[in-house]
């Protein structure tokens, strides 16, 4: 039996319409919470002011409700650990930034895009960011900054550190610092907290016990475990789902408008049929053919 205090989360970004890949991940997340008598949180990951749109927040809530996925805490219904939209949680991220700065875990990086492009080694896979070459890594003046604004801030990943975790779906994972991933961003030059920092801060503050998400984030989990440790938080359980691909083997992105939940619904598919198709088609092969 799992402990009764299971807390899971759905964490979509309102930068486009949800597609069937999201439907599958979120359905699995909701099933796991229900099976464990737990609480499910909807967290609106609207950190990026350039790309997030209010209409997509409304659409994601409607589409999830249409699918029959229910949550107990979220931007629409409140809860004890709110606010549940990342754009309203800046003070939490700033507090974490200060702690990382004081602990010497992060440093300011003034490399331009051009510097990075010239020095970059090719990433191991197309989804991932190139490994940071380390030009600013020796800087020790981070503590003299009162605010993060105006430059990039990176986490100093210990060279050759093994980050291991057991994923409840895909099994044992091991990533090596400096080889599989390099010093990653925690705060962006345009004064927006980076994805990795926000997720870690929110998962800890919202007392998330299990993270269910797509397997494209496995390597990010290694980064996030380093951040969790640096901030003194416990590490949750992880359940990474296989990604849904189309019949050509291409990963669904939000731009696959034809496979958005909204379009399938407009074409007359029922929520049950959408979930059935996704569950049936992708559980083993990861392929969905409409
Ligand atoms: Zn730099």
Image (spheres, rainbow, N blue to C red):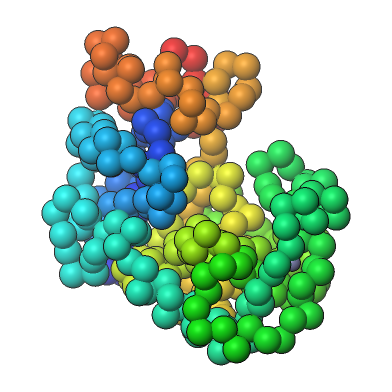
Residue 32 visible, this angle: no
Q: Residue at x 25, y 24 (%)?
A: 271
x%, y% of residue 224?
56, 66
26 on left or right of 168: left
x%, y% of residue 40?
26, 55
In the picture, the quarter occupied by the C terminus is: top left
Quadrant containing ligand 1: bottom right
x%, y% of residue 152?
62, 66
Q: Residue at x 16, y 59 (%)?
A: 78
Q: Residue at x 40, y 61 (%)?
A: 210
In the picture, the quarter occupied by the N terminus is: bottom left
Please tell me which residue lies in front, 99 or 12.
Answer: 99
Q: Would you identify the image quadrant in which residue 183 lies?
A: bottom right
- Which residue lies most toward the top here? 267
Q: Residue at x 72, y 52 (%)?
A: 113
Please tell me which residue lies in front, 116 or 220.
Answer: 116
Q: Is residue 163 above or below residue 190?
A: below
x%, y% of residue 169?
52, 49
- Which residue lies most toward the left here? 77
Q: Is residue 7 above or below residue 260?
A: below
Q: Is residue 46 above or below residue 60?
A: below
Q: How many marks?
A: 0
73 on left or right of 238: left
Q: Is residue 223 above or below residue 290?
A: below
255 on left or right of 219: left
């Amino acid at each position: 039996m799992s402990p009764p205090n299971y807390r899971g989360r759905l964490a979509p970004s309102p930068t486009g319409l949800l597609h069937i890949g999201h439907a599958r991940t979120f359905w699995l997340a909701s099933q796991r919470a229900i099976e464990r008598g737990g609480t499910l949180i909807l967290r609106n990951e609207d950190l990026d002011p350039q790309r997030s749109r209010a209409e997509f927040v409304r659409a994601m809530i409607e589409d999830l409700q249409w699918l029959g996925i229910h949550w107990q805490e979220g931007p629409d219904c409140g809860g004890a650990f709110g606010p549940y939209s990342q754009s309203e949680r800046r003070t939490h991220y700033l507090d974490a930034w200060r702690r990382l700065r004081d602990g010497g875990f992060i440093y300011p990086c003034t490399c331009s895009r051009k510097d990075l492009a010239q020095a970059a080694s090719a990433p191991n896979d197309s989804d991932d960011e190139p490994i940071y070459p380390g030009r600013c890594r020796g800087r020790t003046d981070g503590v003299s900054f009162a605010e993060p604004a105006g430059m990039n801030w990176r986490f100093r990943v210990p060279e050759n550190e093994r980050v291991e975790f057991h994923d409840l779906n895909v099994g044992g994972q091991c990533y090596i610092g400096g080889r599989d991933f390099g010093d990653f961003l925690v705060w962006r030059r345009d004064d927006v907290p980076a994805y990795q920092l926000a997720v870690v801060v929110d998962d800890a503050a919202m007392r998330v016990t299990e993270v269910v998400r797509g397997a494209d984030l496995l390597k990010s989990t290694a980064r996030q475990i380093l951040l969790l440790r640096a901030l003194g938080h416990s590490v949750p359980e992880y359940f990474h789902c296989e990604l849904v691909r189309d019949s050509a083997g291409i990963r669904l992105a939000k731009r696959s408008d034809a496979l958005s939940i909204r379009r399938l619904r407009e074409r007359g598919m029922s929520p049950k049929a959408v979930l059935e198709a996704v569950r049936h088609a992708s559980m083993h092969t990861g392929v969905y053919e409409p």
